[in-house]
Amino acid sequence: MPPAPKAVRTAGGSHKASWSKKVLLSEDPGAAALDSNDPNYDEILDGEYNLDIYECGTTFRTVRQRAPSYATGHVNIEEAKLSLPEFQKKLSGILHDYFASKDATAAVDEIKDLDCSMYHDELVYRTIKIALDHEESCQGLASSLLTLLYSAHVVTQSQNQRAFEKLIEVWEDLSIDVPNAPEQILKFLDCALCDGIVADNFVTRLPENLLRKIRDADASEFIDVYEQLDELKTFKEHAKAILVDYFASHGGGGAEEVGQSLLALEKPGMHHEFVRSALQLSFDRDVRTRAEVIQLLADLRDKRVLTDDDLTLGFGRMLGSLEDFTLDCPGAPDMLSGLIVQAVVEELLPPAFLKNSLRLRTGNDVGINCVRHAISVLDSERVWRQRHERHGRFNLAGSPCSADDDDLANKNKVEFAALEEEGIKKWKQELRNAIIEYFCSADGDEFCRLAAEWDMSSEQAAIIVKYILIMAMERTGEQCLMAADLLCHCVLVREELSKDDIVNGFKLIMSNISDVKLDIPDAVDMLRAFRRLCIKRGILERTAPEVADADDDAEEAAEQQQQQDDDQDQSK
């Protein structure tokens, strides 16, 4: 095994070479964009901005022994002046000119002028993707440009890492047009490691399918893949066994035992695979178990067994593979969406995870729809809003807003209210459709499956009861009996609703009974019949509030007031 090469220091830092020959980044000496504040800056070398040659690939094995550090970082990113399609079009033109002229300075300046920092993960991803379709010299130029952009503080390390994550996710699709795409991606990654534009241990977190592909391709420069692949497979087997035991004991062992078992494996760089496995295994279980998984991950994070990066990467990998996983588990997107909602509310995932996933189209159409549904639920959940009013407002771009930042809060107040209202309307329409489908199919299990995926609050549960009853009263007696059957199934069989939810549903209807009677004149009598039936079926206690007619109450109140007036007159 040849020794790992050392990156050659020239003109301000460690720069990579092309895959095959020496590259001159600028024909004009001194025109390269150097940072004089860089600690490696050497003014003697300024103007000799050449890249010395070395073979990428062997650095892979040297970083695996370093301390884990999957840095994601946080940066304040302003809103882009261009739409994403406009940015992509302009970037393609810049790269085309750069590959022709080799003028790195002009390329960096043009990218800065676009002033679209929020798209810079897309910038890195698209630069590498476009370079894969070109000859090796252009790939070297692209790799060099990424280093310059990082050195000039145009692109951050976390943006670079998100871009490589996207490349890792779609390598199979890229291989259709570029058969050796996996090897080329790893060469880009290896050179990125040399120059420090991604975290040192990033390469230790490559997924099994990519490692297996590299091994099967017998790429000698990545011979260390064999060892890493074996270690990863062993860790995943142990992680699955830990989770199976945890589920079998219904969480009886607690996070303490799980944490000890994980730490005993001594593979902290692979803990994201534990997160991914926990999410995947929860799909075969009920909604309560999925809630327990979120609690387990939260406990492990609090005990510092899992890091924020483990959680973000684990959820991201699950989202990225969702399209294939859906073939065997059609309900996976809805279940993962519910888990993402819980993770964001419990602050296991930053809200920026949602925006980044949408921008990079993680998981393609299936993943995009999953994230959009999660955002819709978060926007409509009052508990989400209340939680962040207590802990400081938070926007979905991922930047924490100070409680004193009233100007920003007022600016977004109307927009947030509109999003909240739109999300509630969308959910209520889904609820109506589900109830109508139940009346047609009489499939209570399917309705309960949908209810579980909504991951509803107590307020939503009361709304569900209200809609079931009112939509039944608008129809025939047969649908009324079906509605009672559905409520019993939800409470007694599937436990998606509780007896308190039934009570709150009745109260919700009674609070607006005057309006209900406009459409259903005998609503009070029908509701009383429902109350008796629910008591008989055992889903409502006999002590539950009586159904009173608002008109009767008004008449009684008027009579009482009249009686009081008469008593006062007599006393006088």
Image (spheres, rainbow, N blue to C red):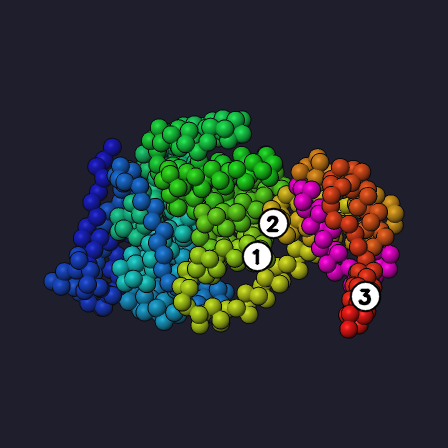
Give above or below for 307 relative to 140: above
Q: Give the side of residue 23 with respect to residue 129, left or right.
A: left
Q: Position of residue 364 (x, y in %)?
A: 54, 51
> Residue at left 52%, top 57%?
386
Q: Residue under circle 3? A: 563
Q: Position of residue 514 (x, y in %)?
A: 79, 62
Give above or below for 494 relative to 363: above
Q: CA distance from mark 2 to mark 1?
A: 9 Å
**Labelled pair 2, 3 in contact (Cβ < 8 Å):** no
Q: Position of residue 393 (x, y in %)?
A: 46, 61
The image quadrant of residue 542 is: top right
Judged by its main secondary structure, the magenta piece is helix
At mark 3, the secondary structure is helix
Mark 3: amino acid: Gln
Which residue reaches farthest front?
A: 572
Q: Residue under circle 2? A: 457
Give neighbour class at mark 2: few <14, some 14-19, many 20+ (Cα, 10 Å): few
Mark 2: amino acid: Ser
Q: Which residues are magenta?
A: 496-523
Screen quadrant of the N terminus: top left
Residue 506 on the magenta span:
yes
> Residue at left 74%, top 49%?
545
> Residue at left 64%, top 58%?
424
Q: CA distance from mark 3 to mark 1?
A: 44 Å
Q: Using the image, tell me which numbered label, if any, was put on residue 382.
A: 1
**Labelled pair 2, 1 in contact (Cβ < 8 Å):** yes
Mark 1: amino acid: Arg
